[in-house]
Image: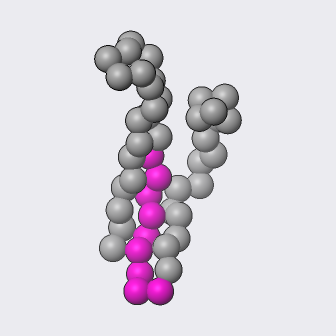
């Protein structure tokens, strides 16, 4: 099964935020991240 995991970071009701998304493959034995594009560190800290 392939899932898209999304998260949003920003002030509730604020005008600025960032949405991050990762695609993952879920099997009986493991999780594998399918997204290969790196996030910008200054956007997630």
Judge left or right: residue 2 versus residue 42.
left
Q: Nearer the viewer, residue 12 or 38?
A: 12
Residue 10: percent from left, percent from top: 44, 25
Q: Which image quadrant is residue 3 in?
A: bottom left
Residue 29: percent from left, percent from top: 47, 86
Q: Which image quadrant is residue 17 in?
A: top left
Judge left or right: residue 1 versus residue 45.
left
Residue 36: percent from left, percent from top: 59, 55
Q: Is residue 20 magenta?
A: no
At horizontal 41% and vertical 42% (from top left) the residue drawn is 7
Overall secondary structure of the magenta section: strand
Residue found at the very far right of the displayed protein: 41
Give the position of the C terminus as an image quadrant.
Answer: top right
Q: Is residue 24 magenta?
A: yes
Q: Is residue 39 above or below residue 26?
A: above
- Which residues are drawn in magenta? 21-29
Judge left or right: residue 21 versus residue 44.
left
At horizontal 50% and vertical 80% (from top left) the residue drawn is 30
Q: Which image quadrant is residue 13 in?
A: top left
Q: Is residue 28 above or below residue 6?
A: below
Give the position of the N terminus as an image quadrant.
Answer: bottom left
At horizontal 63% and vertical 45% (from top left) the residue drawn is 38
Q: Is residue 21 above or below residue 40?
A: below
The scheme the figure's colours follow is one colour
At horizontal 59% and vertical 35% (from top left) the residue drawn is 44
Give the number of callouts: 0
């Amino acid at each position: 099964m392939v899932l898209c995991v999304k998260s949003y970071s920003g002030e509730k009701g604020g005008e600025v935020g960032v949405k991050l998304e990762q695609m993952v493959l879920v099997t009986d034995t493991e999780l594998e991240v399918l997204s290969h594009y790196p996030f910008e560190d200054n956007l997630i800290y």
